[in-house]
Amino acid sequence: VSSAMKSLPLALAAAVAAEDIKVIGAGLTRTGTVSLSNALHKMGYATYSLRTAVAYAQVPMWQDLADETGTLDPAAVNKALDQLSTQGYNATVGFPACFMYKEQMARYPDAKVLLSLRDSAEDWAESFLQTYGGKPSVHSLGQFPTSVVLPSLSKTKHWILGALGLPQDRPATAEEAAAAYTRWEAAVRAAVPKEKLIVHKAADGWEPLCKALEVADCPTIDYPNFGSNRGMVRVLLGVFEMLAHWWWLMLGVLLAEVAGLYMFISHLRANAAPRAKQD
């Protein structure tokens, strides 16, 4: 890892000269990816994650990465990887970049592949269904008015569910979510050579990660533990779901308020006109 990457905060590291991806995150969201992203940053990597995509308004870049079945578009993949490289990122973690771990491997053959996992498929399914895959869920992103106002979120939602083999028109069941996680883990293990694969759980801490990535200056502080952001995710998706079901009522209230304000201003003007004439 370059000394520039070690000394710069993440927001500034993205402005450094183009870098090759050295760590390819192949783990799904809800596998401690927020803590892992922070850990990699403390180890000197400039890490790209879902939070980075949202913070820098880059979600539109990902909307056409794949079709509704999750089949990747090679041209869109190359464009996304070009952008990550030119912005100075040298590690990727979690959604949405994890879905193109094979393409990253082909482009960066010397990179390590980091598969973050939870304790069990059932554990992941419970976490996923309590956030993105449950109710309220990402399905609300594909409904009006979000699908019109924020089409990039709607399109991204479709291909992510397609890539996981999860239903597009309803929340997944616990069994379906657990099966999706199991399929994903098995696919990554089968696709990545053993000498390049790093399997990591948050409970493993620093030492195995530093050893696998050959980081001599291993951090001595506690391994990052950002806990769960389930509440924040559910609130955000709840807003989108409320808009999907009650947009017509909220629009009616807004129009009524605008009409009321217009009538009030008109009334004030009408009353003020005679006085102006009398003066």
Image: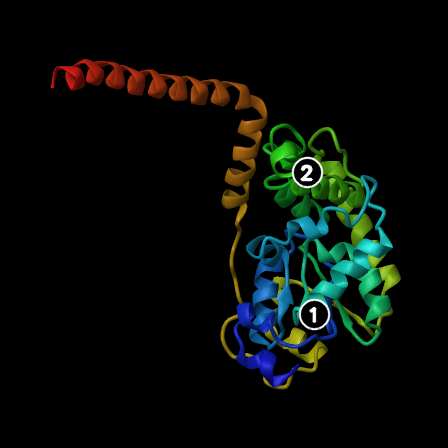
Q: Where is residue 90 in the image (x, y as percent from the top left)?
A: 69, 72
| Residue 126 shows in the view | yes
The residue at 88%/60% (across/down) is 190
Decide which of 116, 93 is in the foreground and name it. 93
2 or 1: mark nearer the eye? 1
Return the disc, 2 or 1, that comes first in the chain's sequence. Answer: 1
Q: Position of residue 161 (x, y in %)?
A: 75, 41
The residue at 75%/65% (across/down) is 82
Query: Where does label 2 land, which residue?
Result: 154
As drawn, 194 above or below 235: below
Q: Is residue 145 left or right of residue 106?
A: left
Residue 41 position by quadrant: bottom right
Decide which of 26, 15 is in the foreground and name it. 15
The residue at 31%/17% (across/down) is 266
Query: Would you say the residues marked 2 and 1 are in contact, meaning their CB atoms lie under 8 Å apart?
Result: no
| Amino acid type shown at disc 1 | Thr
Q: Which of the labelled discs sits on residue 86, or is there none?
A: 1
Q: In this view, does 105 lie to the left or right of 5?
A: right
| Amino acid type shown at disc 2 | Ser
Give the crowd class for mark 1: few <14, some 14-19, many >=20 residues within 10 Å.
Answer: some
Q: Position of residue 117 (x, y in %)?
A: 69, 58
Q: Position of residue 253 (x, y in %)?
A: 43, 19
The local secondary structure at tag 2 comes to helix
Could you tell me how far apart the alpha carbons at marks 2 and 1 are, in whole angstroms?
Answer: 27 Å
The C terminus lies in quadrant:
top left
